[in-house]
Image (tube, rainbow, N blue to C red):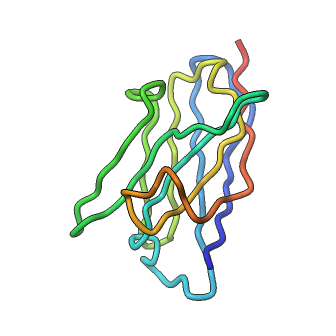
Amino acid sequence: QVQLAESGGGLVQAGGSLRLSCAASGRTFTTYAMTTYAMAWFRQAPGKEREFVAASGFSWDIESRDYADSVKGRFTISRNAAKNVVYLQMNSLKPEDTAVYYCAAAPSFRGVRTPDYWGQGTQVTVSS
């Protein structure tokens, strides 16, 4: 079982930046255990469906990353493997980035868009 806890959300003006963090833990979650999972960020804006934002996964020690077109060049997903933490650095934020952001984990990068585990979410609000 994997528990995910997001933090770092808040209110920011358009053009600003925020960094979200997601800490992974669990009964069998040891140091570097996160490297065995593909990690992703999703978001859900009011009245809209949850959508994919970014993902990171490892295959033969090579990291792959994927981004939604709407955030490419502005958002960056990264990890601190030793701390089992994944980050989402968000720059040049726009009002349309306002949403609840969720961290998620999947057993493989191929299945990262249908993850097995979800965090509780953190609110990001971008004012115009």
Residue 21 against residue 61 in the figure, above or below = above
Name, please, the residue furthest toward the top. 128
Please name the residue shown 73% across and 18% down the image: 127
Name, please, the residue furthest toward the right. 47
Q: Position of residue 88 (x, y in %)?
A: 51, 45
Residue 82 against residue 23 in the figure, above or below = below
Horizontally, residue 58 falls left or right of residue 28, namely left
Name, please, the residue furthest toward the bottom. 28
Rendering quarter of residue 69? top left
Closer to the camera in the image, 14 or 105:
105
Please tell me how many numbered marks the rendered image carries. Answer: 0
Closer to the camera in the image, 45 or 32:
45
Residue 53 against residue 29 in the figure, above or below = above
Please name the residue shown 52% across and 34% down the image: 90
Please name the residue shown 72% across and 39% down the image: 100
Q: Position of residue 44 (x, y in %)?
A: 69, 36
Horizontally, residue 12 falls left or right of residue 110, namely right
Residue 26 against residue 62 in the figure, above or below = below
Rendering quarter of residue 11? top right
The C terminus lies in quadrant: top right
Closer to the camera in the image, 42 or 79:
42
Q: Position of residue 46 (x, y in %)?
A: 78, 29
The N terminus lies in quadrant: bottom right
Horizontally, residue 1 falls left or right of residue 39, namely right
Please name the residue shown 43% across and 58% down the image: 111
